[in-house]
Image (spheres, helix red, strand yellow):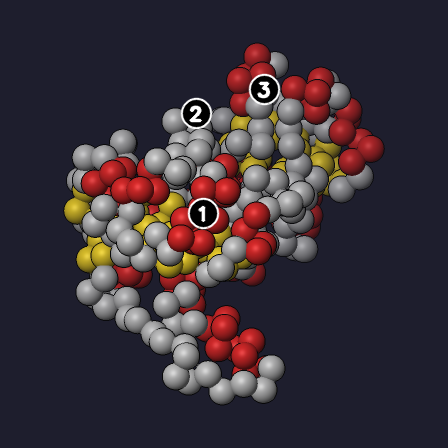
Amino acid sequence: MLILISDAFDPGLPEKIAKFGEITDDKGRIPEAEVILIRSKTKVTKEYIDGAPNLKLVIRGGVGLDNVDQVYAKTKGIKVFNTAAASSIAVAELAMAMMMAMPNNIIPGHNTMKEGKWEKKQLKRTELYKKTLGVLGIGRIGTETAKRAKAFGMNIIAYDPFVKSHDFAEMKASIKDVLKESDYVSLNMPLTDDTKGMLNKETLKDCKDGAYILNTGRGKCVIEEDIVEALDSGKLKGYATDVWYSDPPESTPLAKAPNALMMPHIGASTKENLLRIGDIIEELLGKYAKNEL
Protein backbone atom coordinates (compact mmCIF):
# COMPACT_ATOMS: atom_id res chain seq x y z
CA MET A 1 0.00 0.00 0.00
CA LEU A 2 1.05 3.62 -0.49
CA ILE A 3 1.38 5.68 2.68
CA LEU A 4 1.48 9.45 2.19
CA ILE A 5 3.11 11.53 4.92
CA SER A 6 1.33 14.82 4.28
CA ASP A 7 2.67 16.95 7.17
CA ALA A 8 5.78 17.25 9.35
CA PHE A 9 6.53 14.30 11.62
CA ASP A 10 9.66 12.97 13.29
CA PRO A 11 12.35 12.42 10.61
CA GLY A 12 12.65 8.78 11.67
CA LEU A 13 9.00 7.98 10.94
CA PRO A 14 9.43 6.83 7.29
CA GLU A 15 11.97 4.18 8.32
CA LYS A 16 9.79 3.10 11.26
CA ILE A 17 6.75 2.39 9.06
CA ALA A 18 8.43 1.32 5.80
CA LYS A 19 7.61 -2.32 6.63
CA PHE A 20 3.94 -1.59 5.95
CA GLY A 21 4.29 -0.32 2.38
CA GLU A 22 5.72 2.37 0.12
CA ILE A 23 6.27 5.72 1.85
CA THR A 24 6.03 9.07 0.07
CA ASP A 25 5.66 12.75 0.90
CA ASP A 26 4.70 13.61 -2.68
CA LYS A 27 1.24 15.21 -2.43
CA GLY A 28 0.81 14.73 -6.15
CA ARG A 29 0.22 11.07 -5.34
CA ILE A 30 -2.86 11.67 -3.18
CA PRO A 31 -5.07 9.75 -5.68
CA GLU A 32 -2.91 6.65 -5.17
CA ALA A 33 -2.64 6.78 -1.39
CA GLU A 34 -4.34 4.14 0.75
CA VAL A 35 -3.16 5.72 4.01
CA ILE A 36 -2.55 9.41 4.68
CA LEU A 37 -0.76 10.73 7.77
CA ILE A 38 -1.60 14.31 8.71
CA ARG A 39 -1.18 16.80 11.50
CA SER A 40 -2.99 20.16 11.67
CA LYS A 41 -1.91 21.65 8.33
CA THR A 42 -3.62 19.23 5.94
CA LYS A 43 -7.39 19.65 5.69
CA VAL A 44 -9.15 16.43 4.77
CA THR A 45 -12.29 17.98 3.35
CA LYS A 46 -14.97 16.47 1.13
CA GLU A 47 -13.08 17.73 -1.91
CA TYR A 48 -9.82 16.27 -0.61
CA ILE A 49 -11.48 12.90 -0.03
CA ASP A 50 -13.06 12.93 -3.49
CA GLY A 51 -9.56 13.39 -4.89
CA ALA A 52 -8.29 10.33 -3.03
CA PRO A 53 -10.31 7.38 -4.41
CA ASN A 54 -8.01 4.75 -2.88
CA LEU A 55 -7.99 6.26 0.60
CA LYS A 56 -8.90 3.85 3.40
CA LEU A 57 -7.22 5.26 6.52
CA VAL A 58 -6.38 8.72 7.86
CA ILE A 59 -4.21 9.05 10.96
CA ARG A 60 -3.99 12.48 12.57
CA GLY A 61 -0.80 12.96 14.54
CA GLY A 62 -2.26 14.93 17.42
CA VAL A 63 -5.60 15.33 19.17
CA GLY A 64 -8.09 17.55 17.35
CA LEU A 65 -9.92 16.11 14.35
CA ASP A 66 -11.73 19.27 13.26
CA ASN A 67 -9.52 19.36 10.13
CA VAL A 68 -11.07 16.08 8.96
CA ASP A 69 -14.60 15.75 7.58
CA GLN A 70 -15.28 12.65 9.63
CA VAL A 71 -18.91 12.35 8.55
CA TYR A 72 -18.06 12.30 4.85
CA ALA A 73 -15.07 10.03 5.45
CA LYS A 74 -17.37 7.49 7.11
CA THR A 75 -19.70 7.48 4.09
CA LYS A 76 -16.69 6.56 1.97
CA GLY A 77 -15.60 3.78 4.31
CA ILE A 78 -12.51 5.70 5.42
CA LYS A 79 -11.35 5.09 8.97
CA VAL A 80 -10.03 8.09 10.93
CA PHE A 81 -7.84 7.92 14.02
CA ASN A 82 -5.85 10.38 16.09
CA THR A 83 -2.93 9.90 18.49
CA ALA A 84 -4.56 11.55 21.50
CA ALA A 85 -2.59 9.61 24.11
CA ALA A 86 0.73 10.99 22.82
CA SER A 87 0.34 14.75 23.18
CA SER A 88 -0.94 15.27 26.72
CA ILE A 89 2.37 15.95 28.45
CA ALA A 90 3.73 18.26 25.75
CA VAL A 91 0.61 20.44 25.64
CA ALA A 92 0.22 20.51 29.42
CA GLU A 93 3.80 21.68 29.85
CA LEU A 94 3.22 24.52 27.38
CA ALA A 95 0.06 25.51 29.25
CA MET A 96 2.05 25.66 32.47
CA ALA A 97 4.82 27.65 30.79
CA MET A 98 2.31 30.23 29.58
CA MET A 99 0.60 30.32 32.96
CA MET A 100 3.94 31.05 34.64
CA ALA A 101 5.12 33.55 32.04
CA MET A 102 2.21 35.98 32.29
CA PRO A 103 2.06 36.80 36.04
CA ASN A 104 5.86 36.80 36.20
CA ASN A 105 6.16 39.28 33.31
CA ILE A 106 8.75 37.09 31.62
CA ILE A 107 8.21 38.55 28.13
CA PRO A 108 8.12 42.25 29.18
CA GLY A 109 11.08 41.67 31.48
CA HIS A 110 13.18 40.14 28.71
CA ASN A 111 12.17 42.71 26.10
CA THR A 112 12.83 45.73 28.31
CA MET A 113 16.21 44.35 29.35
CA LYS A 114 17.18 44.01 25.69
CA GLU A 115 16.13 47.62 25.22
CA GLY A 116 18.56 48.64 27.94
CA LYS A 117 15.86 49.39 30.50
CA TRP A 118 15.77 48.40 34.18
CA GLU A 119 12.09 48.12 35.11
CA LYS A 120 12.41 46.36 38.44
CA LYS A 121 9.82 48.63 40.09
CA GLN A 122 7.41 48.65 37.14
CA LEU A 123 7.22 44.89 36.59
CA LYS A 124 5.21 43.33 39.41
CA ARG A 125 4.77 39.60 39.96
CA THR A 126 2.07 37.43 41.43
CA GLU A 127 2.34 33.79 42.50
CA LEU A 128 0.44 30.73 41.34
CA TYR A 129 0.47 29.37 44.88
CA LYS A 130 -3.05 29.14 46.35
CA LYS A 131 -4.60 30.63 43.21
CA THR A 132 -7.51 28.79 41.58
CA LEU A 133 -7.12 27.14 38.19
CA GLY A 134 -10.32 26.38 36.34
CA VAL A 135 -10.00 23.65 33.73
CA LEU A 136 -12.58 23.60 30.95
CA GLY A 137 -12.33 20.13 29.48
CA ILE A 138 -10.50 17.78 31.82
CA GLY A 139 -9.58 14.93 29.51
CA ARG A 140 -5.99 13.79 28.99
CA ILE A 141 -4.45 17.26 28.51
CA GLY A 142 -6.63 18.90 31.15
CA THR A 143 -5.68 16.19 33.62
CA GLU A 144 -1.95 16.58 33.00
CA THR A 145 -2.29 20.34 33.40
CA ALA A 146 -4.23 19.91 36.65
CA LYS A 147 -1.59 17.53 38.03
CA ARG A 148 1.16 20.06 37.38
CA ALA A 149 -0.85 22.96 38.77
CA LYS A 150 -1.55 20.93 41.91
CA ALA A 151 2.21 20.58 42.40
CA PHE A 152 2.40 24.39 42.45
CA GLY A 153 -0.10 24.48 45.30
CA MET A 154 -3.01 25.69 43.20
CA ASN A 155 -6.66 24.90 43.86
CA ILE A 156 -8.17 23.06 40.88
CA ILE A 157 -11.78 23.20 39.74
CA ALA A 158 -13.13 21.95 36.43
CA TYR A 159 -16.08 21.56 34.11
CA ASP A 160 -16.45 18.73 31.63
CA PRO A 161 -19.84 17.42 30.49
CA PHE A 162 -18.38 13.90 30.29
CA VAL A 163 -16.68 13.80 33.70
CA LYS A 164 -18.56 13.59 37.01
CA SER A 165 -15.63 13.21 39.39
CA HIS A 166 -11.88 13.65 39.14
CA ASP A 167 -8.83 12.83 41.25
CA PHE A 168 -7.22 16.26 40.82
CA ALA A 169 -10.13 18.66 40.50
CA GLU A 170 -13.39 19.63 42.12
CA MET A 171 -15.98 19.26 39.37
CA LYS A 172 -18.44 22.11 38.81
CA ALA A 173 -21.92 21.97 37.28
CA SER A 174 -21.37 24.63 34.62
CA ILE A 175 -18.80 26.74 32.79
CA LYS A 176 -20.11 29.78 34.65
CA ASP A 177 -19.35 28.12 37.98
CA VAL A 178 -15.74 27.67 36.88
CA LEU A 179 -15.27 31.16 35.43
CA LYS A 180 -16.57 33.03 38.46
CA GLU A 181 -14.10 31.32 40.83
CA SER A 182 -10.97 31.01 38.69
CA ASP A 183 -7.87 33.18 38.73
CA TYR A 184 -6.66 31.20 35.72
CA VAL A 185 -8.75 29.35 33.15
CA SER A 186 -7.24 26.58 31.01
CA LEU A 187 -9.27 25.93 27.89
CA ASN A 188 -8.83 22.36 26.63
CA MET A 189 -12.10 21.56 24.87
CA PRO A 190 -12.35 20.29 21.28
CA LEU A 191 -14.09 22.39 18.64
CA THR A 192 -17.74 21.34 18.35
CA ASP A 193 -21.02 23.11 17.70
CA ASP A 194 -21.38 23.50 21.47
CA THR A 195 -17.88 24.87 22.12
CA LYS A 196 -17.49 27.19 19.13
CA GLY A 197 -17.28 30.75 20.46
CA MET A 198 -17.96 29.55 24.02
CA LEU A 199 -15.86 32.37 25.48
CA ASN A 200 -17.48 35.53 24.18
CA LYS A 201 -18.67 38.95 25.28
CA GLU A 202 -21.41 37.48 27.48
CA THR A 203 -19.60 34.54 29.05
CA LEU A 204 -16.48 36.62 29.75
CA LYS A 205 -18.63 38.72 32.09
CA ASP A 206 -18.69 35.68 34.38
CA CYS A 207 -14.89 35.76 34.78
CA LYS A 208 -13.27 37.17 37.89
CA ASP A 209 -11.84 40.62 37.31
CA GLY A 210 -8.17 40.27 36.43
CA ALA A 211 -8.35 36.60 35.42
CA TYR A 212 -5.96 34.98 32.97
CA ILE A 213 -7.07 32.63 30.18
CA LEU A 214 -4.87 29.97 28.56
CA ASN A 215 -6.04 28.38 25.31
CA THR A 216 -4.38 25.17 24.16
CA GLY A 217 -7.67 23.73 22.89
CA ARG A 218 -8.97 25.33 19.70
CA GLY A 219 -8.81 28.92 18.52
CA LYS A 220 -12.44 29.08 17.46
CA CYS A 221 -13.61 28.23 20.98
CA VAL A 222 -13.17 31.93 21.72
CA ILE A 223 -14.27 35.11 19.97
CA GLU A 224 -10.97 36.92 19.57
CA GLU A 225 -12.50 40.40 19.31
CA ASP A 226 -14.30 39.86 22.62
CA ILE A 227 -11.08 38.65 24.26
CA VAL A 228 -9.33 41.83 23.07
CA GLU A 229 -12.15 43.99 24.44
CA ALA A 230 -11.83 42.24 27.83
CA LEU A 231 -8.06 42.79 27.79
CA ASP A 232 -8.46 46.46 26.87
CA SER A 233 -10.93 47.04 29.69
CA GLY A 234 -8.85 45.16 32.25
CA LYS A 235 -11.56 42.55 32.80
CA LEU A 236 -8.91 40.03 31.76
CA LYS A 237 -5.36 40.45 32.98
CA GLY A 238 -3.94 38.24 30.27
CA TYR A 239 -4.70 35.82 27.44
CA ALA A 240 -2.23 33.21 26.21
CA THR A 241 -2.94 31.07 23.17
CA ASP A 242 -1.24 28.45 21.05
CA VAL A 243 -4.26 27.91 18.77
CA TRP A 244 -5.82 30.01 16.03
CA TYR A 245 -8.72 30.34 13.63
CA SER A 246 -6.32 29.10 10.95
CA ASP A 247 -2.67 28.00 10.87
CA PRO A 248 -1.13 30.50 10.49
CA PRO A 249 -3.80 33.11 11.27
CA GLU A 250 -4.60 35.32 8.28
CA SER A 251 -5.01 38.19 10.73
CA THR A 252 -5.83 38.49 14.41
CA PRO A 253 -6.81 41.41 16.64
CA LEU A 254 -4.72 39.78 19.37
CA ALA A 255 -1.55 41.00 17.64
CA LYS A 256 -2.16 44.51 18.99
CA ALA A 257 -3.84 43.56 22.26
CA PRO A 258 -2.28 44.27 25.66
CA ASN A 259 -1.12 41.29 27.74
CA ALA A 260 -1.62 38.76 24.94
CA LEU A 261 0.93 35.95 24.77
CA MET A 262 0.89 34.26 21.38
CA MET A 263 2.50 30.98 20.31
CA PRO A 264 2.60 29.45 16.78
CA HIS A 265 0.71 26.21 17.56
CA ILE A 266 3.71 24.34 18.93
CA GLY A 267 2.01 22.63 21.87
CA ALA A 268 2.45 19.14 20.42
CA SER A 269 5.79 19.82 18.75
CA THR A 270 8.24 18.48 21.30
CA LYS A 271 10.84 15.96 20.15
CA GLU A 272 9.55 13.47 22.68
CA ASN A 273 5.94 13.85 21.59
CA LEU A 274 6.76 13.37 17.91
CA LEU A 275 8.44 10.10 18.86
CA ARG A 276 5.35 9.03 20.83
CA ILE A 277 3.14 9.95 17.87
CA GLY A 278 5.32 7.77 15.64
CA ASP A 279 4.95 4.83 18.01
CA ILE A 280 1.16 5.11 17.95
CA ILE A 281 1.10 5.44 14.16
CA GLU A 282 3.24 2.30 13.91
CA GLU A 283 0.81 0.48 16.20
CA LEU A 284 -2.25 1.62 14.22
CA LEU A 285 -0.68 0.65 10.90
CA GLY A 286 0.16 -2.76 12.33
CA LYS A 287 -3.46 -3.31 13.30
CA TYR A 288 -4.66 -2.00 9.95
CA ALA A 289 -2.37 -4.42 8.09
CA LYS A 290 -3.90 -7.27 10.10
CA ASN A 291 -7.47 -6.01 9.52
CA GLU A 292 -7.81 -5.37 13.25
CA LEU A 293 -8.93 -1.70 13.06
Residue 261 vertical placement versus 51 (above, below) = below
Q: How crowded is mark 1: few (under 14 residues within 10 Å), some or many (20 or more)?
A: some
Q: Is residue 163 visible to the viewer in this orientation of the structure?
A: no
Which residue is under mark 2? 193
Task: Give the residue drawn at x 42%, y 68%.
Answer: 101
In terms of secondary structure, where does tag 2 sit?
loop
Question: At label 2, which amino acid type do we have?
Answer: Asp
Sequence order check, earlier mark of 3 and 1: 3
Along the horizontal axis of the image, is 37 left or right of 207?
Answer: right
Which residue is under mark 1? 229
> Picture quarter containing residue 40?
top right
Question: At label 1, which amino acid type do we have?
Answer: Glu
- Given residues 159 and 63, the one toward you in this image is 159
Disc number at residue 277? Answer: none
* Of marks 2 and 1, the one in the foreground: 1
> Picture quarter containing residue 288?
top right
Report the residue that reaches farthest toward the front: 233
Task: Give the residue drawn at x 44%, y 34%.
Answer: 197
Which residue is under mark 3? 73
Along the horizontal axis of the image, is 193 left or right of 37?
Answer: left
> Picture quarter containing residue 12?
bottom right
* Of marks 2 and 3, the one in the foreground: 2
> x and y percent of residue 2 in the render?
73, 32
Q: Spatial distance from mark 2 to mark 3, Cα to Cα?
A: 19 Å
Q: Spatial distance from mark 2 to mark 1, Cα to Cα?
A: 24 Å
Q: Spatial distance from mark 3 to mark 1, Cα to Cα?
A: 39 Å
Question: At label 3, which amino acid type do we have?
Answer: Ala
Q: Residues within 10 Å of mark 2 (few under 14, many from 20)?
A: few
- Given residues 156 and 141, the one toward you in this image is 156
Task: Give the residue drawn at x 52%, y 33%.
Answer: 65
Task: Give the residue drawn at x 29%, y 47%.
Answer: 207
